[in-house]
């Protein structure tokens, strides 16, 4: 399990580096990972994404993880198992963002209640995942972590 002090250090480092923290969450069930599809507004299919959230001012990373999963899927996080990794990028308004990724345990895998996405899919971790290259890298790190 990830300690509160480790989470505090990750949040502090994002602040020191001048990046806005976001969380991405890996929920695994029997070798598959939960991915979400945004509402598609055009002819180009957008990649699937992990559940997640922007960390609100005054919110801890653990609170953001639990809130993001609950808001996007209706699932309840019971613990944060691993900090899997992170990457930085620029938001659409050119602000630096750090997306921190965590593998979590949930109370139950069903029912999933989507609020802001068109659909969800449980995709095999060992298959080709229709995600961005950054998320593919995070999921590869996760696979290596759990296979050792």
Image (cartoon, rainbow, N blue to C red):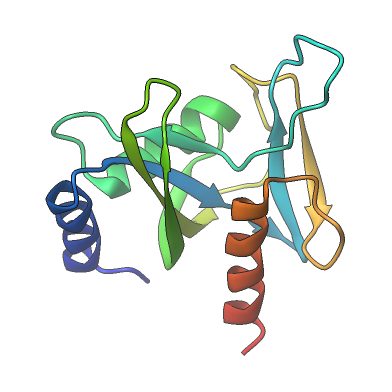
Can you say which quadrant of the picture contains the N terminus?
Answer: bottom left
Q: Nearer the viewer, residue 10 or 105?
A: 10
Vertical position of residue 31 compared to residue 37: above or below:
below
Q: Nearer the viewer, residue 123 or 136?
A: 136
List x then y, in percent, for residue 62: 30, 49
> Which residue is most to the front?
94
Q: Identify the residue at image location x=69%, y=34%.
A: 36
**Residue sitting at 33 percent across and 68 percent down?**
2
Q: Is residue 22 left or right of residue 19?
A: right
Q: Residue at x 17, y 63 (%)?
A: 9
Identify the image quadrant of the C terminus. bottom right
User: Left or right: where does residue 8 sit relative to residue 108?
Assistant: left
At x 20%, y 36%, the residue is: 59
Can residue 110 be seen here? The reply is no
- Picture layout, residue 55 above or below residue 118: below
Residue, far bottom: 148
Q: Is residue 126 visible?
A: yes
Residue sitting at the far top: 41
Residue 46 x %, y %: 75, 29
Query: How many marks can you see?
Result: 0
| Residue 136 in picture, x, y percent from top left | 67, 57
Residue 134 in the image, given as x and y percentages of width and height: 59, 53
């Amino acid at each position: 399990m990830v300690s509160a002090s480790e989470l505090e250090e990750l949040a502090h480092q994002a602040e020191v580096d001048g990046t806005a923290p976001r969380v991405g969450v890996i929920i695994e069930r029997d070798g598959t990972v939960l991915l979400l599809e945004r509402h598609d507004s055009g002819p180009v299919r957008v990649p699937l994404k992990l559940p997640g959230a922007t960390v609100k001012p005054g919110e801890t990373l653990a609170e953001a993880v639990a809130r993001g999963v609950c808001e996007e899927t209706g699932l309840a996080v019971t613990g944060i198992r691993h900090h899997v990794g992170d990457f930085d990028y620029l938001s659409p308004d050119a602000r630096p963002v750090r997306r921190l990724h965590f593998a979590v345990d949930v109370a139950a895998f069903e029912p999933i209640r989507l609020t802001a996405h068109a659909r969800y899919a449980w995709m095999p971790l060992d298959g080709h995942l229709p995600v961005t290259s950054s998320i593919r890298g995070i999921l590869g790190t996760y696979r290596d972590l759990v296979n050792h």
